[in-house]
Amino acid sequence: MNYFIREIKDTEYGVLNEFLYEAIFISEGVLPPDRSIINNPELKVYTENFGQRSGDNCLVAEVNEKIVGAVWVRIMNDYGHIDDETPSFAIALYKEYRGLGIGTEMMKRMLYLLKEDGYKQASLSVQKQNYASKMYLKLGFEIAYENAEEYIMLISLRQISDL
C-alpha cells in the first residue's frame, strides 16, 4: 500500500479529535463509547489548543490524499505522564489501515523528530490487551510502570539511531 507521512498542517488540527477517538482501545465484545467521550477533561488534554504549546508535534499518514492516521506528542499531564520534560505519545489509524506497518513508521519518524528537537525520552500509556503494546516494545519502549490494566512505557531517545 502506498502511503505518505508528513507534518500536519495548521488547518488540519481538527482531525486530531477524530484520531483521539480512534485511539481509544476497545476490548473484544465491548461496545464503543459515545464519541462525546473525547470531551472528557482527561482526554481533551491530548488535543485542546494543539499547536499552541511548545513541544506540540504531529505527523499524519495519507493514502490517496486522505489522512488515515496520526501520531502526535505534547508535554501534558496525561495517562502516560512522566514529567514536564517528557513528551507523551498519542497514535491512531483507521481500522482498515492497521497492521500494515504505517503506525510503526509514523512512530519511528516521530521518535527521530523528538531526538532532533533535543528531547531525552518519550512516554506513552497503553492498555495491556492492546496489540500495539508489542509494537512499542519492538521500537525500544520499556515498561516503566504498570497497573492491572495498562502499561506506562518510556523510551530513551539516545537509542533512536538503532531503529
Image (spheres, rainbow, N blue to C red):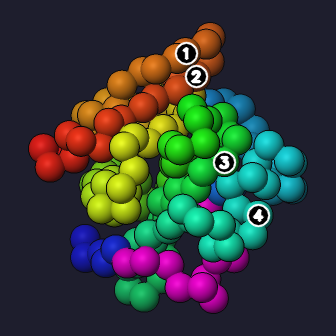
Q: Amino acid at mark 3?
A: Met
Q: How many marks?
A: 4
Residue 83 on image: x %, y %: 59, 35
Q: CA distance from mark 2 to mark 4?
A: 24 Å
Q: Earlier in the sequence, mark 4 or mark 1?
A: 4
On-image quarter of the N terminus: bottom left
For residue 76, which numbered disc appears in the image? 3
Q: CA distance from mark 3 to mark 2?
A: 18 Å
The answer to whether the residues at label 4 and label 1 have Cβ atoms under 8 Å apart is: no
- Name the secondary structure under disc 4: loop
State the residue in front, 96 or 8: 8
For residue 55, which numbered disc appears in the image? none
The answer to whether the residues at label 2 and label 1 have Cβ atoms under 8 Å apart is: yes
Q: CA distance from mark 2 to mark 1?
A: 6 Å
Identify whether 139 is placed above or below 56.
above
Question: Does residue 15 appear left or right of residue 94 in this picture?
Answer: right
Residue at screen point 62% across, 18% down: 149
The answer to whether the residues at label 4 and label 3 have Cβ atoms under 8 Å apart is: no
Question: Does residue 111 appear left or right of residue 34 in this picture?
Answer: left
Query: Crowding at label 2, few (<14), some or many (≥20) Cα neighbours within 10 Å?
Result: some
The boundaries of the magenta stretch are 6-19
Q: Amino acid at mark 1?
A: Glu
Q: Earlier in the sequence, mark 1 or mark 3?
A: 3
- Name the secondary structure under disc 2: strand
The residue indicated by pointer 1 is 146
The residue indicated by pointer 2 is 150
Which of the two discs, 1 and 3, sits closer to the camera? 3
Q: Is residue 24 visible?
A: no
